[in-house]
Each structure stands twice: as structure tokens, then as C-alpha cells.
Image (spheres, rainbow, N blue to C red):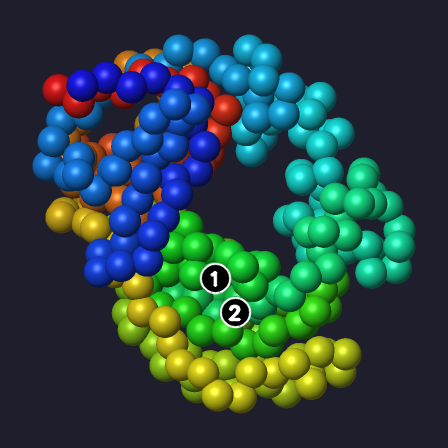
Amino acid sequence: MQYQGVLTKMQTEIGNPIQYYLVFDSDFIHVNQLLNKKLSIKFIGYKCLACGENKKIYRQGYCYDDFYNQPQVGDWVMRPELSKAHLGIEDRDLDYEKKAQLQPHIVYLANSSNIKVGVTRKSQVPTRWIDQGAHEAIEIVEVPNRYLAGITEVALKDHVADKTNWRKMLKNEIEDKDLLEYRDKLREFIPEEAKEYFIENNKETELDFPVLDYPGKLKSLNLEKTPEYSGVLKGIKGQYLIFDDDTVFNVRNNEGYVVQLTMI
């Protein structure tokens, strides 16, 4: 069976284990059903997620020009503390920025390779945790806009990490932590503007990923250097496909790439 389309991040559905889907324009693949089967990936070209043209992808699925023009990849996306829509100040497109920034956001703790603090829209819980490969997570505050979430994250990352070690995450070099205890210890460091939004009564969310075998020495698949690859799919974690020869493929990092997928 063969599919061809533009890669975008895998869609997910909470479950035991989590269900993964690759969605193309006219079809989709339930990736869990490919476990223990041989899969071939062939690089065909590019299709920018904004202009739709066959232009080399620069970052996050966008060509160079669109990466520096499209509102959905403004600096405030990666650095929420730079959000200004609550002040009525435009970055690239104020209407878009108001819709994205002026909605409930969560500051959370997630444990994937280590405990880290992060920010996401409330509507993206637990999707954001799944994408990071976290096996457990908990909310700290729920605030009404992205700016408040951003300044809270900045304050807390002086006391806890804000990055995931993707290699440890994929090797499953993890240990369970008491996130409630960590959350309560961090409470005193929440900025005054956000203290009232602290979530008093909640519990950890635990996540189960569909992985048959974890890799040893990781080899990251780069489609530009290796335009054709095949291997037996052994797991899916975060936005990674894990293969039997310890090759891992980050689907999200290859958004905008046109590929041909063949089940052998």
C-alpha cells in the first residue's frame, strides 16, 4: 500500500496507548497499525505550509519568506512572554494574534526526559504533552492570555528546566516523579500577576506511548541526506517514529516535506 502527501505533525488521540494518525490532503494513515511492519519513506520535494509552493523548507514547515512573514510563526510563539495582543499591539497580524493569544493558556510541568516547565493553550491539553513525549504531566496555572503564561514560565524556569532531552526521551531513560510536590514547591515563584490563577486541586495525567522496543544508539533520519529509507516500525513517541535499526524520524521537524510512504 502506498501513500503520498505533505508531512504535518501527527494527529493524536488519547488512549492506552495513544493513537497516532498521519493526515494527508485526501487520505490518512492510522500509524499504530503499522507497528512491526516494514515502512519505506521516500523524499519527493517540498510544499510550504503557507504559500504551497515547492520551495525549500526553512523552519517549521515554511519557506524562508513565509517564516518571516506569517503570524503563526512570530517570535511570541516560541517566547510567549513577548505576546502583546492584550495591549492591542500588533506583531504581524493583530486579528490573528488576538485569537491565538487572548484565550486560556496553561503553564505546566511535564516529565519526558526530565521535569520541565512549558506553556500551551488550554485547548491543546494533553496534545502538547503527547507531542513532547511526556509520560506524566500536571497543570500549574490557567491564565486568560498567553502573556501571563509567558512571564510565569520565565519566572519558573529559573528553578526547573524548560527543555527536553530528546535522546533520553526516546531511549525511555526516565523515572517517575511526584509532580504535585514539584508544583507546590514552585508556587512561591509564580509572578504576582498570575498567583490568583494557581490550580489548587488537580492530579497528574499519565500517558502511555505505543512503543514495542526502545532504541539504543540513536540515528536521526535526515531526508535531504538520505532521501530513501526503509525499516520496521517499532514505536511512536512524541512526534517520532522509531525503527528497528535505531533510526528515529521526527515527523514534526519535517513538516512541509512531500513524501511517499510505502508499506512493504
Q: Which mark is residue 160?
A: none
Location of mark 2 (residue):
108
Give the distance between the C-alpha atoms of the residues marked 1 and 2, in whole angstroms.
10 Å
Q: In the rendering, at what x and y percent does residue 255 appear?
A: 48, 29
Location of mark 1 (residue):
125
When asked about the image quadrant of residue 230, the answer is top left
- Could you tell me which residue is drawn at 65 percent across and 81 percent down? 197
- Secondary structure beneath dot 1 equals loop
Amino acid under label 2?
Tyr
Q: Is residue 45 above or below residue 148?
A: above
Judged left or right of residue 245, residue 144 is: right
Quadrant of the snapshot with the C terminus: top left
Q: Is residue 68 visible?
A: yes
Q: In the rendering, at what x and y percent does residue 155 appear?
A: 67, 72
Quadrant of the snapshot with the N terminus: top left
Q: In the rendering, at what x and y percent does residue 52 appear?
A: 58, 17
Amino acid under label 1?
Val
